[in-house]
Amino acid sequence: MSQLPVQGIECLLVLSEELHFGRTAARLGYSQSRVSQLIARLERRVGTRLVERTSRRVALTRFGAEFLAELRPAYAHLVGVVAQASERAKRGSLREVRIGFQGSVYEEVTVALRRFRACHDVSVLVTEIPLGSPFSVILDDAVDCAVVQLPARDERLTVGFRFPPQDQFLAVGTTHPFARRGQVDVEDLVVVDLVTPAGDAPGYWVDAQVPRSTPSGTALRITTGVTTMEEGMALVANSDHGMLVCRPFVERSNRRDVHYIPVRGLDGTSQLGLVWRADRTTPQLRSLARLLHEEFAAAIAASTT
Amino acid sequence: MSQLPVQGIECLLVLSEELHFGRTAARLGYSQSRVSQLIARLERRVGTRLVERTSRRVALTRFGAEFLAELRPAYAHLVGVVAQASERAKRGSLREVRIGFQGSVYEEVTVALRRFRACHDVSVLVTEIPLGSPFSVILDDAVDCAVVQLPARDERLTVGFRFPPQDQFLAVGTTHPFARRGQVDVEDLVVVDLVTPAGDAPGYWVDAQVPRSTPSGTALRITTGVTTMEEGMALVANSDHGMLVCRPFVERSNRRDVHYIPVRGLDGTSQLGLVWRADRTTPQLRSLARLLHEEFAAAIAASTT
DNA sequence: ACCATCGATCAGCTAGGCTCATCGATGGTG
DNA sequence: CACCATCGATGAGCCTAGCTGATCGATGGT
């Protein structure tokens, strides 16, 4: 049996408006006797009379009035919580959306997120996800979606939005032979020991981030893996390793111990995407994708005029 | 049928702690199958899965966790409201105590009221009650208790506390023949047209306030009634009427158009009392009476040392 | 491969939710 | 003042829906 006499409470709430057992019963779809019973039981439960009633007059007791003053908002709140949950369930939306990021966050993304929060009355929780494991956190449900490097060839994943393709840069330490170069060619990479993301990402993805060989077919030296951008940069700064990074990262970086050199032949080969579990697709996530789309469309329009 | 699936809610609350259907059932005194049914129904009601469950593992859905985060406090609050009401019902205490006053309010009374509010977590509503109808507002339940002039010889009323008896004064206008007198005698009152409280108070009470005759037997002139102290003072100030008032009123009065003259022979004949309906006696009111007692005991002790 | 554990499901029982009929109280009316 | 209409309380009784016990299938450990 229930701890809380809800039926009695609902009955009292209506009765307090109608001040008439018959009408109260009609409104609730009960018989008059049921209302009488429910009120009587509630009074027994609370331990005192809540409604003063004769055959001619129904009025709240002073105690009843005070009780109702507290009860009404408390009950309404609880009903609201359940109703709101139903509402959100229908839209499949969450109250707190966890978004994973891999390294860099575009300016446009933060703007879109702000609009997203406002539109959907959600809070956004930003998490950094391992550089070399872009998909497992999504699949494990540790985040609801993530901005990760593409491609994402996995049936269990949906790419909701593809960011504009970006050129790539080679990050090297200040003492590296390439440090003073204004540009390098893909083929030049053969002499660099490239840092690669380490994690459980599928092979095709790792290969897409750090090619195993140059276009001409020469194999590249890849000996060291890192799990965060920060780790990679630290490694690059203090060794002769190199690391491929995308433009947004370069633009937001302010390290003095690392130089970024454009790589000819890798133009537009880096692309981020908003990815989520296909079976967790919700209107909310679609909306976020659309907001990102709009934001980038606006940014592009602004830059061309 | 109830609008709110409380049983399911209670079940979910326990299940979220136990994460085990069997133990949840045990705690609620249900069978395991019942818990399963209740959760399933709640999920149907809300419209989405709240608990992820296999035969080996029970865990809240992300949606379920968010739902619970709102549900738990809302439910607890509602339960609290009902429980608190039960508590108050047991003690017969109200959340808001209406206290009626007739004219003057002692300093000690306000102190006692402050302590009363603090002790019982109640709010106090002070109302002025008609000068000539001290009992009807109490009997009509318009106030929960009142500080009124005694005597109160009514079986339906309880006098919870008797204030210290006070001397009486004759209030007259500045132009009145007595205005400059330092004192008058009861017998002197025969030449004054005394203002009397007008209302539905019983005869014995009116007689006690304004004697019909002096101790020597001479009848007094009583032609005019008033319903508030303010009204009486206004009348006294602008006519040759006189009005008997008690010391606390004199001390708190700062009217320049009325003079107050001590009346020899009426010393200690005015007494206020805290009165309430006998059938509405509560520990709360008894406590208020006790607080008043303590306050006056302290005041007397302070004045004698 | 076997077993123990656990949640889902189904059929069935019965407690309790609910109604109907009736009563007594109340206040208005001629 | 008798009569009547209205309304809430009460008790008997019906039947729904709350609940259980038995069983099944899934899961994970040994």
Image (cartoon, coloured by chain):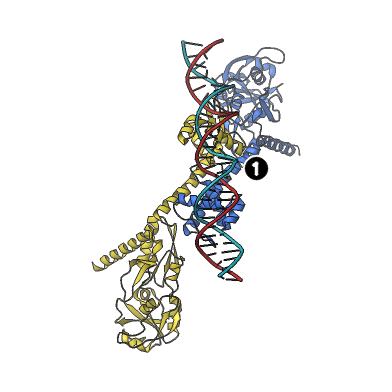
Chain colours: A yellow, B blue, C cyan, D red
Residue D30 horizontal side relative to residue A285, left or right:
right
Residue situated in front as seen by the camera: B222 or B10: B10
How many tags in the picture?
Answer: 1
Query: Would you identify the image quadrant in which residue B103 lies?
Result: top right
Q: Is residue A218 positioned above or below B39 on the image?
A: below
SS at circle 1: helix
* Chain to which the residue tagged by mark 1 belongs: B
Name the residue: 35% across, 59% down: A287
Residue situated in front as seen by the camera: B155 or B175: B155
Find disc 1 in the rendering and name its residue.
B119
Where in the figure is residue A213, as x and y percent of width and height? 34, 85
The quarter in which the C terminus of chain B is drawn is top right
**Res B142 seen here:** no
**Res A204 seen here:** yes
Where in the figure is residue B110, as x and y percent of width and height? 63, 37
Residue type beneath disc 1: Cys
Residue situated in front as seen by the camera: C8 or B264: C8
Where in the figure is residue A121, as x and y percent of width and height? 41, 55
